[in-house]
Amino acid sequence: MDSGETHVFTFSMATSFYVYCKDQAEIDRLWKAVTSRGKEWPCGWMEDEYNVCWQTVTKDMDMLFDNSDPERAYRVMQELYKMKRIDITTLRRAYEG
C-alpha cells in the first residue's frame, strides 16, 4: 500500500480502525486532527486525508449499548444517530434515562 506502484483498490469503511478514547478531551483532539483534512461521518466515524476510516469509541461503549434493557439501549442509540463526533455526556444521559 505504501509503494509507488499503481493499485487497483481504494480504502472503504469495510476496513476501519477502532480508537478507544479515555475521555471527551481525547475524542475531541483526535476528531479535530483526523477530520481537519478528512471527513466527518455519523456515529463517531471519521475519514482521514488518505481515505482510511476510523471509529472513535469510549471505554464504556459496551456498557452504554448493553441491550439487557432494550428501552435504555434504544435511547442511547437514538442519541448516537444524531451525532458525528461522539459526545460521551449525551450518551451517558440517555443511558441514565
Image (cartoon, helix red, strand yellow):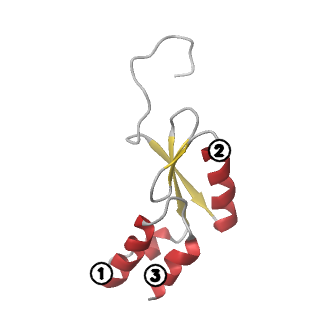
In this rendering, the answer to whether 44 lies above or below 47 is below
Q: Earlier in the sequence, mark 1 or mark 2?
A: 2
Residue at image mark 1? 70
**Disc 2 residue type?**
Ser
In front of the other: 24 or 15: 24
Name the secondary structure under disc 1.
helix
Q: For the residue carrying disc 3, how many other residues have a C-alpha within 10 Å: few (<14), some (14-19), or many (20+)?
A: some
Name the secondary structure under disc 2.
loop
In front of the other: 4 or 93: 93
Residue at image mark 2? 36
Of badges 1 and 2, the one in the foreground is: 2
Disc 3 from disc 1: Cα separation? 12 Å
In this rendering, the answer to whether 68 lies above or below 6 is below
Q: Left of 74 or right of it: where is 91?
A: right
Of badges 3 and 1, the one in the foreground is: 3
- The residue that appears at 46% across and 43% down in the rendered structure is 16
Of badges 2 and 3, the one in the foreground is: 2
Q: For the residue carrying disc 2, how many other residues have a C-alpha within 10 Å: few (<14), some (14-19), or many (20+)?
A: few
- The residue that appears at 58% across and 77% down in the rendered structure is 89
In front of the other: 9 or 61: 9
Q: Earlier in the sequence, mark 3 or mark 1?
A: 1
Residue at image mark 3? 94
Q: Where in the figure is residue 26, as x and y percent of width and height?
A: 68, 60
